[in-house]
Amino acid sequence: MDAPLLVNPDVDYNKALPIQQKRIIAFINHFIMDTVSFLNTFAQSCESRLMDFEFKLQKVDASLKILESQLSSISDENLVTNEESKIENNLPEMETSELNEVPTEEIKSEEVTEPVESKPSEDPQYSKYFKMVQVGVPVQAVKLKMKADGFDPTILDQM
């Protein structure tokens, strides 16, 4: 069985009767209702996702504040001794023996000839941020904290 043709290709559209206005309004109403329903669902989905991200950000912020308070309780002397022990443990035995054989006069002369430059890590206003990195806080988080405190975060790249 052949399906009946709904529109005859030979129809003169100037002589065809228009669709009833009630039917057009019903189609437009249906389209508008479907579109509004979709947009409402989409907006609710976006809002719930944003709320989830805001909750996660609050958790990260709380963790960062806890880390900052823990860092403020650590003295500078503890950090220096921990760094020295890590460096000594990472050096191979051969290099440490070579370091011990270098005369101290050569080391002193090299130290004197180097120009005196202040490193950002030695600056007291940045020391807090360099401590955070040394303890293990991710660099991006420290940069965000620096930016929030009004400092230039590119200084961390100059370690």
Image: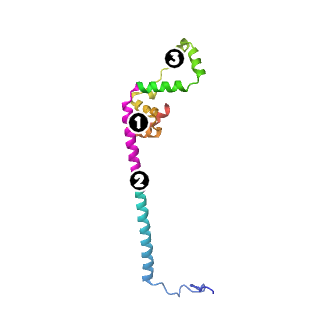
Question: In the rendering, which numbered label is found on residue 143?
Answer: none
Give the foreground label among 2 and 1. Answer: 2
Q: Is residue 25 magenta?
A: no
Mark 1 or mark 3, which is nearer to you? 3
Which amino acid does the dot numbered 3 rest on?
Glu
Mark 1–mark 3 distance (CA, rounded to whole Å): 31 Å
Among the 4 quarters of the image, the one containing residue 8:
bottom right
Residues packed near mark 3 inside 10 Å, few (<14), some (14 to 19) or many (20 plus)? few
Q: Is residue 58 magenta?
A: yes
Write down the region rendered in magenta.
49-76
In this view, 125 is above or below 40: above
The residue tagged 1 is: 151
| Disc 2/disc 1 C-alpha distance (Å) | 29 Å
The residue located at (52%, 26%) in the rendering is 87
Coordinates of residue 120 in the picture (x, y in percent): 45, 29
Tell me the element at label 2. Answer: helix
The residue sitting at 45% across, 73% down in the picture is 31
**Which one is nearer the viewer's eye here, 111 or 130?**
130
52 displayed left or right of 96 = left
Q: Which residue is the site of mark 2?
A: 52
Label 3 SS: helix
Which quadrant would the N terminus be assigned to in this image?
bottom right
Residue 11 image point, x, y percent: 57, 86
Q: Secondary structure at mark 1?
A: loop
Number of the front mark, 2 or 3? 2
